[in-house]
Amino acid sequence: MKTGIHPDYHPLIVEDSSTGTRFLTRSTATSDRTATWTDGNTYPLVVVDVTSDSHPFWTGANRVLDKAGRVEKFEQRFGRRVRPGKGA
């Protein structure tokens, strides 16, 4: 492997913002925030909106993942979309 061309690959903690679940993994992502893991070491902390712990495909539950109200903003601006053959 060539030296100096690959990004730093290091352990970090990923936190699901909707469930609070954390897991330790490795990534090239960086963060100014840190957290202490169960092994006593401190790692960078990356907070994400969706992980397998909260994604409807993995949980089998239907959830609205739109926290910013983007769908409502769109519907207010352009009206509710009607799909052909589906009604309102």
Image (cartoon, rainbow, N blue to C red):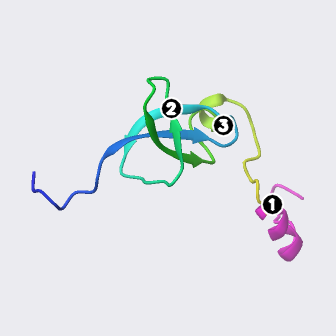
- The circle on residue 56 is 3
Closer to the camera: disc 2 or disc 3?
A: 2
Per the image, the residue denoted by label 2 is 23
Q: Three-letter amino acid code at disc 2? A: Phe
Inter-mark Cα distance, 1 to 2: 28 Å
Q: Image point 81% across, 66% down: which residue?
A: 81
Taking 68 as reference, is 58 left or right? left
**N-terminal of the two: label 2 or label 3?**
2
Q: Image point 77% across, 59% down: which residue?
A: 68
Closer to the camera: disc 1 or disc 3?
A: 1
**Cβ–Cβ under 8 Å for marks 1 and 2:** no
Figure quadrant of residue 56: top right
Residues in magenta? 70-88
Does residue 69 belong to the magenta stretch?
Answer: no
Q: 12 or 51, which is in the foreground?
A: 12
Q: Going by the picture, which residue comes out furthest to the top? A: 39
Per the image, the residue denoted by label 1 is 69
Q: Can residue 31 be seen in this view?
A: yes
- SS at mark 3? helix
